[in-house]
Amino acid sequence: EIVLTQSPATLSFSPGERATLSCRASQSISSHLAWYQQRPGQAPRLVIYDASYRATGIPARFSGSGSGTDFTLTINSLEPEDFAVYFCQQRYNWPQTFGQGTKVEIK
Amino acid sequence: QITLKESGPTLVKPTQTLTLTCTVSEFSLSRSGMGVGWIRQPPGKAPEWLALIYWDDDKRYRPSLKTRLTITKDTSKNQVVLTMTNMDPVDTATYFCTLSYYYDNTIFDHWGQGTLVTVSS
């Protein structure tokens, strides 16, 4: 089973700042990585798929990069609605696995 | 607008069998290429993928839970059912139904609201 490590567990920013989140895979997963946003009390929502493609309806301030084992989600100019937990997920191998999440909180 | 809605018991006793139903609206489960799956999330923890069924009835299960899980679909009702046997308190979680279609049939592009299942005597 592929392990995804997200660190740190929590990041603190002020609105308008740029957030950079990290996800590392225990083995190469090519570009088969997605990012999901989860607000309190809600289901996760797909943000980025295949490492760098924005899902439908996702603002352009969200971008993803990386391949192999190291991936990054960048949120430019944080809006109030962006403060949430972000999970990475790999679909390279079964079972599909998720990282433990990074909480982006307001400083 | 595509919606997925989970239904089932909110409380089950240890050793009992859990049966959850996902009802999908505005999307046919007969559509070629689609997959409907189940993901659970214990309180305060990461999501965990459980099972997935494809339009052609192909199925995938989480290996560590494979002996306890069964996923089926009823295209006439546009529903997917997950059963999990021998429930334990560690199975307490919110269970989400997901749809995979618009990007790849292994990417979860639509999610239900989730249903919290508590396992307790």
Image (cartoon, coloured by chain):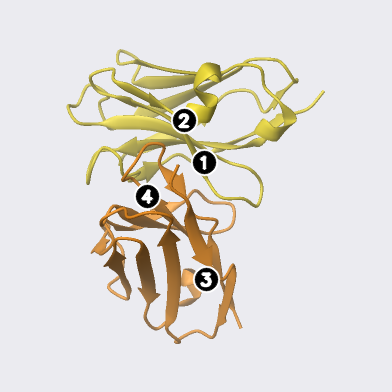
In front of the other: B65 or B1: B65
Q: Which mark is residue B48?
A: 1
Asked whether residue B82 is in view, the answer is yes
From the image, tell me which residue sits under label 2: B62
- Rounded to the nearest angstrom, the CA distance separating label 1 from label 2 is 9 Å
Chain to which the residue tagged by mark 2 belongs: B
From the image, tell me which residue sits under label 3: A83
Where B44 falls versus B113 (above or below)? below
| Secondary structure of residue under mark 4 | strand
Q: Is residue B73 left or right of residue A84?
A: left
Locate the C terminus of chain A by quadrant: bottom right
Q: Are marks 1 and 4 in contact (CB under 8 Å)?
A: no
Locate the N terminus of chain A by quadrant: top left
- Residue type at mark 1: give it: Glu
- Rounded to the nearest angstrom, the CA distance separating label 3 from label 2 is 31 Å
- Rounded to the nearest angstrom, the CA distance separating label 1 from label 4 is 12 Å
Chain letter for yellow? B
- Residue type at mark 3: give it: Phe
Chain to which the residue tagged by mark 4 belongs: A
Chain to which the residue tagged by mark 1 belongs: B
What residue do we see at 55% from left, 18% from top? Answer: B68
Chain to which the residue tagged by mark 3 belongs: A
Where A52 falls versus B4 (above or below)? below
Q: Residues within 10 Å of mark 2 (few under 14, many from 20)?
A: some
Residues at discs 4 and 3 both on one chain:
yes
Residues at discs 4 and 2 both on one chain:
no
Residues at discs 1 and 3 both on one chain:
no
Looking at the picture, how far across and down is residue B61, in whole percent?
Answer: 43, 26
N-terminal-most mark, 1 or 2: 1
Q: Residues within 10 Å of mark 1 (few under 14, many from 20)?
A: many
